[in-house]
Amino acid sequence: MEVTPNLIDKLEEMSALCLNDEQKEQMAVEISQMLGFMEQIKDVSVENGTNSDNVISIDDFAREDDVQKSADIDLVLKNAKNVSDNFFVVPKVVD
Amino acid sequence: MDILNMTALDIADNLKNKNISTIEVVNAFLESYDKFDSEYNAFISLDREMVISQANLIQEKLNKNMSTSVLAGVPIAIKDNICTKGLKTTCGSKMLSNFVPFYNASATDNLINNDLIVLGKTNMDEFAMGSTTQTSFYGATKNPFDFNKVPGGSSGGSACALALNESPLALGSDTGGSIRQPSAFCGVTGLKPTYGSVSRFGLVAYASSLEQIGPMGKNVLDVSALYSVIKGKDNRDNTSLNSPDVDFNRIKNADVKGLKIAVIKEFMDESVNFEIRNAVLKAVDVFKNLGCEVEEISIDFHKLLVPTYYILACGQASSNLARFDGVRYGYCEDASSVNDMFKNARTVGFGTEVKKRIMLGNFVLSAGYFDDYYKKALALQSEIKSKIKNIFKSFDAIIMPTTPSLPYDLGQIEDDKLSLYLDDMLTVLANITGCPSLAVPCGFARNAMPIGMQIIADDFCENTLFTLGNAYQKVTSYHLEKPKAIKGVE
């Protein structure tokens, strides 16, 4: 299928990325190549397939509702650039 | 004593019998690291003080005969997408260049609880997306057998560290062949376990329904011992399961008489390099001589494997990697709005290959395309699984090449990425179906590069794989061959 500049713009937005014009052109070429071989499966008829996420049969199980020790908050916050008290800081979201 | 040439199990025995100390062991491997790593780039990080302090602690336990672990005191290298508390875990990405986990992956916990010594973190393709270890933000790893070739990937650092005697054991992760393909390219042994048999808690997620952490080593016995340490159900991963115990007696006895092996015709045709085909055919003859019954079979889904794999993997990657927004961890640049902050972090933090797979993933999951791509791939996955299950009604194992090509030159595939993706055709089968697959060295090409085969079995039949693999390694010596680089220094 044709990978148009509009499609690349849409995917860029959905992916929360910013590409320059050169990168967009390169991405269009490579994505077009990939879709070229991915498209092979569109016309294949599937007789017995299901839409399960896991091919190994896994029983659902729930943990006991026990209180577990919390992670060390200081260590958790250490990986963030902007923190204040026990919070992560981001630019203002609501005016 | 020649510690570097011992197997991991030999090292553990010698430690237990007080013939050597843990400090002698780690010093031997650190010496190899010092000798080779600046050139070959197998490790991203290694903390000497941490290594020595672990070695001292475990030596104390050994002195008091307090450890029952089969691998007590043995050093191990860990792929850098498996969380290690207090030790940087970068995923080969700029995004996580400063990320220090505050918890261990369950696999890491299992190593520590079994008294292994964590040496450091190994290089990998960024977020495990690649098969050459060239997409790492920290530079490419080189092939131990030829400095100008790639070691494979994405667990290329782990495979390289083993081949260069920088570590006797390693952990990798395998989403589409990332343990087995570098094992083949570097002449080492590696297992992609049955999906669910090893906990994925603490493995930085790429494609959750396809990937597994797995053991890598210098031979099948070491790999089986490491598998016994990391496997098992984990409350922190709801997809984990209890699998059968490793049957060391069966594996060591190596009795494979009467086992039925299938060879898939479509994986032995001209799409596979002829030297690799010949090496695998020779390996099949070895199994025949050991008393196995071998039969050629045919499949009709081989051309669908790579598209199915990439649709599922990219779809899941786009969702899994949405967590990298620069807020709680990862690369972050200040911005005036939250959306700009997210975009800046991801645009600067991710490399090109990762961006491409995220964009492709968003495409196959998006309205209007989901049914034709992702949903169809899921349906195909279950159909392929039922066809493989049928094969295992009549056979104990499948033997096939691990890769269709010999190791590429560094930089060779930059302009032809599609052919690189298509080269995953032999490895993705085990990820799509969840089956275990063991990669074993089975020859050398005329250019002196290693060749590997893989043995695939039904779910939870790792013992069959180890038994066949060990039987093969008892009568062959490909796994004992060393790169020229280390022959001169031993």
Image (tube, coloured by chain):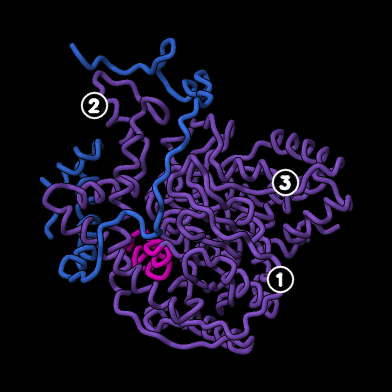
Which residue: 36% across, 60% down?
A55
Look at the image and tell me in which quarter the C terminus of chain B lies: bottom right
Q: Which residue is mark 3?
A: B30
Tell me how many marks there are. Answer: 3
Report the front residue among B133 and B129.
Answer: B129
Query: Which percent across, then down, holds residue B82?
Result: 52, 43
Please give the range of residues in magenta. Answer: B413-433
Q: Which residue is mark 2?
A: B339
> Does residue B104 appear to the left or right of A60 in the view shown?
right
Asked whether the beta carbons under mark 3 and mark 2 sit within 8 Å of each other, the answer is no
Between label 1 and label 2, give the one nearer the viewer. Answer: 1
Q: Which residue is mark 1?
A: B252
Q: Chain of mark 2?
A: B
Residue B144 picture quarter = bottom right
Q: Helix, strand or loop at disc 3? A: helix
Look at chain A in the picture and name its colour.
blue
Cα distance between the residues tagged 1 and 3: 31 Å
Identify whether B428 is placed above or below B135: below
Look at the image and tell me in which quarter the N terminus of chain B lies: bottom right
